[in-house]
Amino acid sequence: MTRAKLPALGYAYVALALPALLLGLQHERAKTTLVTGAAFAYLWFIASLRARLVRFDPDGFFASVVVLGGGAYIALQTLAVIGGATQAAAPAAACAATVIIGSSLAAWRARKIARWFGQAGVAGGIAVLVVGLVEAAGDWTLAGGRVFASSLGFMVWVVVTATYLLRR
């Protein structure tokens, strides 16, 4: 796989993480296997995003924010998915929101995306954060306690971003 195609691993992340979210607590080995593959794909996706952000923002501020948020997110999401811990939803959502907002601001400020698209990214990041806070405060999830809506929102962003990166 070439560096130009690495954003496609965002699709692999979603394809592996989504079934892991949907599996019940009785399928621990399958969930662990899926989350492991998802984490591998996600880390490479984040690396490809970082490479693009460094070009947009040469001092590296936004790229650093995205990498730190991305690394913390995957650790917290793993804890939430494997352990079913809704307490990890809010911190994971905060990390996901950091990735979304940081990358949206970097691309918007560099004028690599339309203003409305940058604003939509920032609004989406805020929405992911708020939903994560509600999930944690109310011990709330979708689909009978298995699916974190904040994670679904982040996965939508990953698919949109991977598509954008592959088209450029």
Image (tube, grey):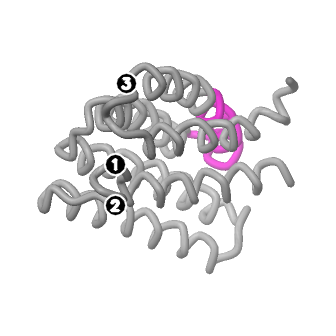
Residue identified by numbered label 1: 146
Give the crowd class for mark 1: few <14, some 14-19, many >=20 residues within 10 Å. many
Residue at position x 36%, y 59% from top? 143
Instruction: Note whether 71 is above or below 90 in the view shown.
Output: above
The residue to which callout 2 is attached is 142
Residue occupying the far bottom of the picture: 116
SS label for mark 3 = helix
Q: Who's the residue at 53% across and 28% down the image?
A: 34
Tell me the amino acid under the disc marked 3: Glu
Mark 1 → mark 2, Cα distance in angstroms: 6 Å
SS for dot 1: loop
Report the magenta residues as a range.
44-59
Q: Residue at horizontal 21%, vertical 64%?
A: 134
Q: Does the segment drawn in magenta span residue 52?
A: yes
Residue 28: numbered disc:
3
Task: Examine the structure image and report whether residue 110 is included in the region drawn in magenta.
Answer: no
Percent of width and height locating residue 168: 85, 52
